[in-house]
Image: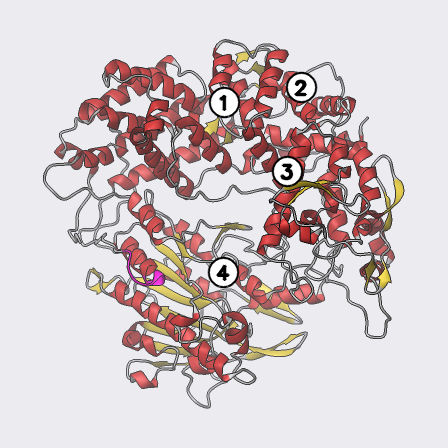
Amino acid sequence: MLAGCEGVIGPSGGGPGGRTEAFVCDNADTIVLGSAPARRLTNAEYDNTVRDLLGGDIPRLPEQPSDAVLQGSFENDALSLGPSDVRVARYETSATLLGAHAVNSAPARDRVLPCSTADVECGRQFVESFGKRAFRRPLTDDELDRWAVFFEAQRSSIDFDAAVQLTIAAMLQAPQFLYRLENEGSEVNADQLELSQHELASRLSYLLWETMPDDELLAAADAGDLESDAQLEAQARRLLTNDRARTAVRNFHRQWLYLDRVLGEDKLPELFPMWGFRARESAKEETLLFIENTFLGGGTVNDLFTSNVAYVDDVMAQLYDIPSPTEPWSQVELDPAERAGLLSRIAFLAGNAHDANGSPPLRGVYVMERLLCEPRPSPPANADVSTPVAAPNQGPMTNRDLFEQRVEPSTCQGCHVRIDGFGYGFENYDAAGLFRAEDNGLPVDASGFANGIGNDAEYDGAVELQNLLGESDVVRNCVAKQWFTYANGRPAEPADTCQLEAIQETFAEHGGNLVELLLSIVTRPEFRLRSQVKV
Amino acid sequence: MSRTPYILDRRRFLTALGLTAGSLCLPSLPGRGARAQGVDPKRVIFYITPHGTVPGRWHMRQPGQDNEEYDYSLSGLGESEFSDILRPLHRHRDNLLIVDGLARMVTYAEEYRIRNNGYSGDQNRHHMSQAHLLTSTWAYQGASTARGGAQSIDQEIGNAVGQPGRWNSRVYGFNHQHAYSYVGENQPAPREKSPQVALNDILGLAPAPSNSGEPTRDDMIRAARASVFDIVTEEFATILPKLSLADREKLERHRSLVRDLEAGVNLAFPVACDSSFAAQGHVIDQFSRITTMALACDLTRVATIVTQNIPGDEFGVDPGIDMHQDIAHASDENGGTTQGIEGMVSYNRVYAEHFAYLLDQLDSVQEGSGTLLDNSAVVWLSELGTGNHAINQLPVVIAGGGAGYFRSGRYVHYPRTAIPLTYGDELVGLAHERLHVSLMHAMGMTERRSFGLEQVDIGDRTISLRDPLPRLT
């Protein structure tokens, strides 16, 4: 069995009473479905969706409270996507502004109005065509009747434009718009429903684009042209060539790899005078550009950990000690002995460090939690987790010496052999991620032993460590698991085991090709299904 | 500027517009939330300033009684007898409780357990104080800095005294570094930093019709807001039966929040309520006026105003001077610089002036035989005690009578005892956390004995955080 499939989940993920269930795939040929909670649009999805739904220059909308992020999960986790008083009130304010925008902006008006006669019949056509795009599926007969009556009441008592405005304002507050509801499916058996073509189109577009289906995808759903896996894959490939996919791929990695962390990092100005607001912003952008181009350029997991290609502005060029580019974000190649892969970039190195020195434990824990998909280890209550400093009577020591001294007791070793086995690999980079061959006047020792990655081995330095991680089955399976979590809007459940293993196997067969991973997720039979609702 | 008070009654308004109820699917309107006849609601406002104060220029202690618990009346004091920092509040002296001698015990306790008991965490006193000030419980330390670890007192009170169709509470202004108000662990409460958006939020609950006789087209569109709510809640009703239990609970909650908004459309403003607002003057004062309007119109009953960190030119120092390093950190009365101490005094006096302006506004709204200020508890807190991060001489002023709960017009002093800290003994008074219990009692939540932690251990001392503070009532 693949390592990523082993383990149990605790009370938080278990069934009633907090029992634990093992992740074991009993029969890979049967299809078992995990849960499919209704997902509210995230703030990003909402903004993208109203942009695509209405067109024109969208007015400035009141800022929504941020989507709460659960530890180790994503902003689109259904569990955290609840309503609140402020959110609901601001949905109303936004919907009201957007309704007015739709009638007052010429491009938006063209986008939402299918006719110009301003009569009852045109109103019904509008309700039908706009409703279908807002709810991302054709209205039911009952819905069409209700909304047409609503429209006509406004049209007859005020006027046609007011009716358009108010209908849009109302539809944008309706649950069919704000939530991704999947209740139109047809029964496959007592446990499973097959999604409607439109529900399938939404799953696809919100995964790859973080927004509603475009006209072409909606038309394909209308025509039943998503029935075959080949058709679905063709649509997915089309979506992936669009810039919206770029934004979505960036957003996934920003969350998975904690790339916002570097934005909050202060460094001691005496030691790092170049570290300021711009350096933080640029460091994040540099890593995102690297990932986005690697990913959509047909790259693999291995490329993420081994490529020395970078896109730099003058700030990053200075930090990487290379000539400034002629224009920002030019493609360059970094010194492959010093900088290759995601984990020798400033965003990771400076984002997982203290204000004066790098932190082997923070960096090691990051590798285990984010890249190996292991639960985050935490120190026992009596651990001293302050930054270690040399005692006055000791001679010069490297950062590594200090940390090794700190974790010397046997009670620490149980965890730290493993954590620091990764963490020491980054000792060639200081608190701001700058390369150093010496630390405190002493040569840097960045050797370690990577344990629990399948291809366990000794290495020397972050480049060698990343070569190992790039080849690791555990890392590759973890990448698949992260995307699976993101695609389903919830953590993996025991019922997902066979599906997840199958996705991981396909991913391996494709050599860890990242675009192929997405294609294999959307062409799985489970992607077309959901579990029956037990009312 | 229009100053016409008005009453919004949806049915009458629609009738006046000549709209027929049938075409609008008017639902039966819920009767909840209406204010009991003749009883003005109680309100609480938190006014929070950064960096602490200069205790020797803030307090108004009786000489020779530092080890006594005592209080005295402020009524007879002349303006010059008020301390340098509190002097701008003199005109409100009969409405004040100046509370001297509180210490934030949760902050000491969390520091203690980090330093001595192996807990990990951010010990920056700004971050810790911002996390603890309104939550009174252990900080959330999971994000490599300290943030609020549970729902804060403003949210707790707001949820208890709020009414459907109105905001339970509002947070206005700025963050000093992190948020003070939290809806839950590491989840800051929504905060509005733009007065205009804050106003829109508030009036969004009850938009004013134009006052001319004939309704305009805009009036009619605004009036149709009720019909929009109707069809939205109807859509929820058709969807809910198709959902799983968990999804149904979530969307049911969403629907009830929409209904609350709808209920708000139908709630009448008090006749005396003045909803006018001009976006003029200092941003702190703008928030004070919005807060006054929101409370007077009963659109919320709890507000938190987090003041901005005012720039140097507003308190008479060179704007190029680093407020944090050169003023706050240099304001220690024993070891600081003249520039630091005097800068810090005038910094705080300017905040006192803005606070007095807020009290002026509240006091100008008549309610029954008194004013809005009488029915409110307006609490001035600072994140810290001093610019050097002390947390044992916290400056606390409670203005307003809390609808008869507080006995105002007095100076209250608590004596101090020693607690052992790693850097030596520290003299502390009573637990600042108990102030929140007092406020809950003032707001009618009299069944509550504590808020946040009930007690903390610091060294061998166990310090109770239970029960309202003595001598305030």
Instruction: Using the rendered view, name the quadrant where residue A330 is placed.
Output: top right
Residue at the disc numbered 1: A213
B79 horizontally vs B117: left or right = left
Q: Is residue B330 above or below residue A301?
A: below
The residue drawn where x is 66% and y is 71% is: B459
The amino acid type found where label 3 is placed reads His
Mark 3 or 1, nearer chain start: 1
Instruction: Provide the residue designation for mark 3.
Output: A253
Q: Are marks 3 and 1 on the same chain?
A: yes
- Nearest the viewer among A177 and B406 is A177
Residue at 80% from the left image edge and 31% from the top image edge: A473
Task: Work out whether mark 1 precedes mark 2 in sequence or the reverse, and give the earlier one.
Answer: 2
Residue tagged by mark 2? A32
Helix, strand or loop status at disc 1: loop
Q: Quadrant of residue A504?
A: top right
Point out the frontmost of discs 3 and 4.
3
User: Residue A532, position in %: x, y?
Assistant: 56, 18
Spatial distance from mark 3 to mark 4, Cα to Cα?
43 Å
How crowded pointer 2 is (Cα within 10 Å; few <14, some 14-19, many 20+) is rated as many
Chain identifier of the residue bearing label 2 in the image:
A
What residue is disc 4 on? B450
Q: Nearer the viewer, mark 3 or mark 2?
A: 3
3D distance between C-alphas at marks 2 and 4: 49 Å
Task: Tell me which segment is drawn in magenta.
Answer: B279-285
Q: Quadrant of residue A193?
A: top right
Q: Amino acid at mark 1?
A: Pro
Q: Is residue A147 above or below residue B263?
A: above
Q: Which mark identifies residue B123? A: none
Chain containing mark 4: B
